[in-house]
Image (spheres, helix red, strand yellow):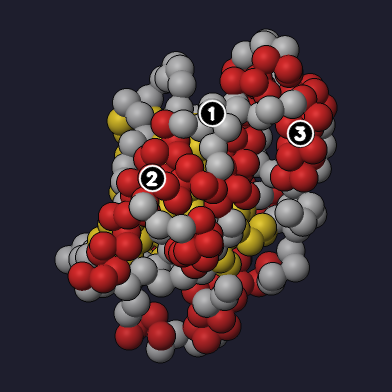
Amino acid sequence: MKVTWERLAPEPTGCIRFLQLNQQAFSGALHAHDALEITWIQSGQGLRFVAETVEPFGAGDLLIIRPGSAHTWTSIGPRPGPARALVVQVLPDAALSALPGWAEVQARVWDGHSAALVIEGALKKTITAHLLAMAHARELGRMGHLLSVLGSCSAAGAADPDIRPLGMRTRHSAGPAAADRRQRLERLLRWTHQHLNDQITIGQAAEFLHVSPAAFSRAFKQAVGKPFTDYVNDLRIAQAQLELIRSDRPVAEIAVRCGFPTLSNFHEQFARRTGESPRRYRDRTAAQGLPDAGNPGRAR
């Protein structure tokens, strides 16, 4: 999957770009830019890719994505309604830097090792209320709501249970060598997605790129941030989560459909990533629709 670097320009009246997306499906390319981005999914389901992570998403998904972090939302499977989202992009600005207390906001929201922050609980209700108000506000009013959002996140602090760090922050470089690496990675990830239900090995992936298994393993971990096998299992488990919510297929059938060789291996990989069994996950989410992915307190 190719990472496209976007060069953003602010709206003529300031450093904020406010977007209301209403489309048939989420299908944007994996991209990165210099802006801090706040994205609230209002309707739609599928898989969310941020840095080296892949998780299912549904209506209510709220993220703050740090500058330079690759991300996209992709609709998967049946699409009962439109894909709708509110997006706010904030570009660096001297006027913001001059505000009292901005250094604290910069340290807690802009900077950090994680690629993004997943917002949940009461803090999500506070932020989404401001996002809705921004849709009907003029430029100065939007700035006021944005500052309230950033102030709320800054006041919450890193240990707040309503904030879950997501992914490792990396910067995507430009130039011919970097472009060639991105193209090779794009080919590999496309091939991986096409063969997800097969028993993919590192040797097969290395052969696809015409390199040795050892060289492939080193290069993949450097480019994506995790071993190839872990990435494949992340993607399979995310698809299994969608299957568990959307269908009444037996767990064993879903395991096979998502490429797991045995039911025991599926249970092990699922619990490692979510902190619960597939059946418990299905029961817990049956009345809720698609929940926030994963378990914030569970280490991978």
Q: Is residue 123 left or right of residue 73?
A: right
In this orientation, which residue lies closer to the viewer: 142 or 120?
Answer: 120
Residue 260, how many percent across, how many down? 66, 29
Residue 201, how many percent across, how many down? 56, 42
In space, the residues marked 3 and 1 are separated at their CA atoms by 15 Å
| Labels 2, 3: front one | 2
In this orientation, which residue lies closer to the viewer: 200 or 225?
Answer: 200
| Labels 2, 1: front one | 2
Question: Disc number at residue 198?
Answer: 1
Q: Is residue 71 visible?
A: yes
Secondary element at tag 3: helix
Image vertical order of residue 254 relative to residue 155, above or below = above
**Residue to which mark 2 is pinned:** 208
Secondary element at tag 1: loop
Image point (54%, 28%), residue name = 198
In this orientation, which residue lies closer to the viewer: 217 or 106?
Answer: 217
**Residue to which mark 3 is pinned:** 265
Residue 144, how many percent across, how many down? 43, 66
* Quarter assignment of residue 171: bottom left
Q: Is residue 43 left or right of residue 291?
A: left
| 2 or 1: tag closer to the N-terminus | 1
In this orientation, which residue lies closer to the viewer: 214 or 143?
Answer: 214
Please state which amino acid type lies under the numbered disc 2: Phe
Image point (45%, 17%), residue name = 78
Image vertical order of residue 183 relative to residue 114, above or below = above
Q: Is residue 144 visible?
A: no
Residue 279, how many percent across, how many down? 80, 23
Image point (79%, 38%), residue name = 268
